[in-house]
Image: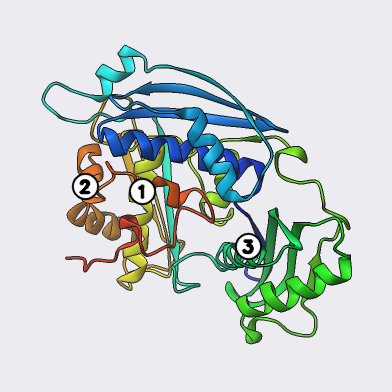
Amino acid sequence: MKDYIFTSESITEGHPDKICDSIADAILDEALRQDPYSNMAVEATIKDDFVLIYGEADTKAHIDYETIAKNVIRKIGYEEDYTVMVKVNKQSSEIHHAVNHENDEVGAGDQGIMFGYACNESDEYMPAPIYYAHKLARQLTKVRRENPLLRPDGKTQVSVEYENGRMKRIDTIVVSTQHAPQATQEEIRTLVMNEVILPCIEKEMMDEDTKFLINPSGSFVVGGSFGDSGTTGRKIVCDTYGGMGRIGGGCFSSKDPTKVDRSAAYYCRYVAKNIVANGLAQRCEVQVAYAIGKSEPVSLCVDTFGTGVKSDEELLAIIRKNFSFEVGNILKELDLRKPIYSKTSCYGHFGDPQFSWEKIKKLEY
């Protein structure tokens, strides 16, 4: 369709799934801080005041899982006393030897497919719906930390109207926020409109027909893990492109960079963004696939949806000339063996210029 409305959502750090992503990546960062060659896949599940930490770890690091989890939850803003159970085993020796070769070559930590996407709809080269949804979620968290009426759990959603394939206006904005028991819905609506929505959304993107739905369900006092359960890796659409670009078969949080579900997805975004940023296409999606233990991908393709200044076959040749999808190169070029992952846990893994996979370089062709 050329004329359509597309919607994406984001969630705040107080959402139970994001609590679990944050715990998992804090554990990963601590492992990499002590041992950059840690192989980690330690996840979390939360419900009420109970946290289960589980998975596989092969590391020289000494990790206090319980303290890390409780510190993450407290930093987010929850003050309840949580019970933490830990069930972490050593990584399978078969997987470990497949990934870590004797000649220092790094093999893919699993088989699978990964995608990267970029477009010219925002200054972050992200699709407009998820760009605005994340922007609202970050602002909601900022306002919440300054206003006792708001609490940590929240969700945002933005519907963008496209005309002839290009964004025209915002049709609907939805914001749901946990709040203090004494807050009225009128207070919440006024606060969110004036301090969250209006500072984030350009006036020209809204009109008299734009709909604003603030806490449409009404009261939202019970939230976080007491309102819903949470698990690491359940918000991969929020973590990537809001549904506008395709996603691979695995989540990101908890996984060390030898696991291509994470590192190769970052590299695909890096490549796609550079195709768009260098003016070679308005939209670009890159797919790569790996076999476990093998360092080179088994396939690589590019799709610019008819927006490329060159054919997709020519762009694929440019990609092969300027980028290497060999696993060891990805780790080295993006400098991924260090504790950077807690910063990715909330508000998306893509778009933030502080990350190495967001840098732009001049392409040779």
Q: Residues within 10 Å of mark 3 (few under 14, many from 20)?
A: some
Q: Residues within 10 Å of mark 2 (few under 14, many from 20)?
A: some
Quadrant of the frame with the N terminus: bottom right
Q: Quadrant of residue 95?
A: top left
Left or right: where 249 falls relative to 163:
left
Q: Amino acid at mark 2?
A: Ser
SS class of the residue under badge 1?
A: loop
At a point 44% along the width and 28% down the height, the residue shown is 64
Mark 1 vs mark 3: give the one in front: 3
At a point 26% along the width and 32% down the height, the residue shown is 35
Residues 51 and 293: in front is: 51
Left or right: where 111 falls relative to 245:
left
* Disc 3 target residue: 145
Discs 2, 3 touching: Cβ within 8 Å = no
Q: Position of residue 317 (x, y in %)?
A: 23, 55
At a point 50% along the width and 72% down the height, the residue shown is 121
* Disc 2 target residue: 324
Q: Position of residue 229 (x, y in %)?
A: 70, 35
Left or right: where 133 falls relative to 71:
right
User: Relative to 113, is 63 above or below?
Assistant: above
